[in-house]
Amino acid sequence: MLKIIISIISAVAVGATLAGPARAASGDTVKTIKERGSLLCTGHNGSYLGFAEVDDKGKWKGFDIEFCKALATAILGSPDKLQIIPVSWAQRFPALQSGDIDVIIKVTGWTMGRDTELGLQFGRPYFIGPTTILTRAELNAKSAKDLEGGVFCINAGTSIERIVADYMGARDIKYEALNFEKAEELRAALYAGRCDALAGFGPFLAATRFNAPNPEDFVIIDEVLALEPEGIAARQGDDNFIDVINWMVSALLTAEENDVTMANVDKQRANPPSPTIGRLLGVTPGIGDRLGLSNDWAYNMIKAVGNYSEIYERTIGKDSPYNLPRGKNHLWKNGGLHYSLVLD
Amino acid sequence: MTAVIAPPQIETTYLGWAKRRLFASPGDTVLTLIFGGAMIWFFQFLLDWAVVNATWAEGGKELCREVSGACWSVIGARGRLIFFGLYPYEEHWRSTFACLLIIATMVLSCVPWFWSMKRLPVLWLSGFGAFVVLMYGGIFGLKVVTTEQWGGLSLTVFIFCAVVVIGMPLAIGLALARRSKLPVVRLVAGSIIDLFRSLPLLTILFTAAVVVPLTVPDWAQGNKLGRVVVAFALFFACYQAEIIRAGMQAIPDGQEEAAAALGMKYGSRIFDILLPQAFRNSLPSTINQFVITFKETSIVTIIGFFEIMASANAAVGTGEWTAQYIEVYFFVGFVYFLFVFGLSRYGAYLERRARLSNVR
């Protein structure tokens, strides 16, 4: 009897595991999206400051949401052909595998475990997440070295704790750590002057400064303690979709490199100042055909959301409340890590 | 002749009441002063914060920074988000009506006139039908709004009602099955109850929302919200079944045996004799279970539903309003309080009513 039960259970389990990856690998996501007429992209179950927020009218906005819009426009021609599905952090990977969403654009770090074990395939990083330092302006600190002997507020039990210890240890900078469990406590301690500096994820620090009683009292130091490349994740084994994602990100960067903006894209398209811009905007055909998209997809996308710089500044950069410096998210020629792929 | 003893004289003035209840002895007086003082201090503080030093004026972060009390402006600016979640802005009236409708259904089903096997199902079916038509649309020229976009208070109330309405009959079935004379039925019911009770609600909901689509073929999956509601209802039913069973066990076996001896059929014995008394016996725990369920609905945020807690998080989760999280949580807490307090008052009314009919 027991044997029968065990064999039934294992048969069901094997069936389930076989069915799982089979569903995930099956099909051509771009074709599915086109047939459905909308892209299913990740939102959040609540809000993640600067990246996925909800405005007063219940509409999604933020850095990640703009990339969802860009992808929807690239594939379907309009940023409105997009459904943002609210998912929690824990839910994002199974939701992708089950087909509840087509793609994860949700500040998701490109780690080896996720890449190899979770059946995910990452596109090139679209955001470089820095761990950096927020400090009081009056200290006039320009680097971590200037904060020698100072008190650092740190979120207890997170990777930040280890990152700061490693970084400071390697440079032999002495500091005193003050640990807090909750983000609210961390912020309150900084505002109350219990610490000289707060180490953490860049966007979090930007929000902390924005909410300070007097934001001008705090500055983000232009020094990076650690980086986490954030990638756009799709299901493993859909090469064409990954191509589309990579060239979508690249086209936004190409546009920035060549000063193609939301405002001047029509003028540039009517009279392309360089062959690259001609190819980017589809005046010289090729950018679309080779991906299975229309040749004006990049034009539509830039018209709808702008280039990389416009997206950044509007949502988390200087035109947003957070005013997060571009830092490593600049183009290579401005000291950052972003570059476009060659458009031939 | 029996001597008639006059009832003790009780002073009915406020002063007399206070003297008797608050200042009867020096010890009482000290305690009254301490707790009275603490209460005055607390309510004074609350009043100052929530009313005296607060503002309702329209404005942003700058205005809130100048106010020492609560900055209710956040409710003005983000209130619709809290109440409606991701529901399309132009269609908010639909969500409002749907919410009022389901609340009205809830209130009506509390009226004794509706308590019959015919009226109650009709009431709930029409209430739910109208709710879904209003919320989902697709007919009468209403735009389709998929369940992914449902949110806020309507979603919270919908999940609660659906769970209770589906879960209650299930619970009765499970409770009856568990005391069945047929061993197989008894065993199956017992296993279901024990299985679901020993799993955390979060795991059950996560499985229903996220794991089912990975293992079950497309045609059998249904809608995500539907799956979650059914799973939640099963969980609710397993707890409620045990509550009802406790209520049944308090009734002497003799009653059922007497009914059987009189030739009453099984259905009649159950629905006319056993269940009404079982419900009356288990009323306090049932209301308890309802209250817990109402508050537990907020767990669905972990599987990406924008019920009122998730929309409150979204409301404070923007640069402009992050500092006003206390006001928003206070506000949402108050909304929960209204519902839960209503439920417990209704429970108290039912108990009074049950006592009166017992006397008769």
Image (cartoon, coloured by chain):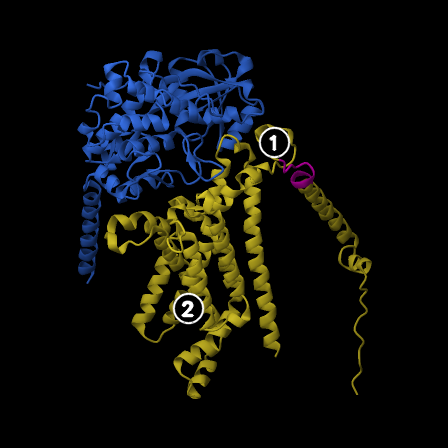
Three-letter code, disc 2: Ile
Q: Secondary structure at mark 2?
A: helix
Q: Residue at x 21, y 55 (%)?
A: A9
Q: Position of residue B21 (x, y in %)?
A: 75, 58
Residue located at (25% from left, 39% from top): A34
A340 sits left or right of A149 in the view: left
Find residue B187 and name its label.
none
Q: Which residues are magenta?
A: B48-57
Residue at mark 1: B64
Examine the rendered structure and indicate whether residue A190 appears above or below residue B181: above
Measuring 19% from the left and 53% from the top, which residue is drawn there?
A10
The answer to whether residue B53 of the structure is visible from this angle is yes
Residue A160 placement: quadrant: top left
Mark 2 crowd level (few <14, some 14–19, many ≥20, 10 Å Cα): many
Q: Chain under label 2?
A: B
Chain in blue, by letter, is A
Q: Position of residue A72 (x, y in %)?
A: 31, 34
In this orientation, does residue A254 appear?
no
| The chain coloured yellow in the image | B
Identify the residue at image location x=65%, y=32%. Answer: B68
Which quadrant does the N terminus of chain B fall into? bottom right
Looking at the image, the residue that sits furthest to the front is A270
Mark toward the start of the polypeptide (1 vs 2): 1
Whether residue B51 appears in magenta in the rendering, the answer is yes
Question: Which mark lies nearer to you, 1 or 2?
Answer: 1
Q: Label for residue B172? A: 2
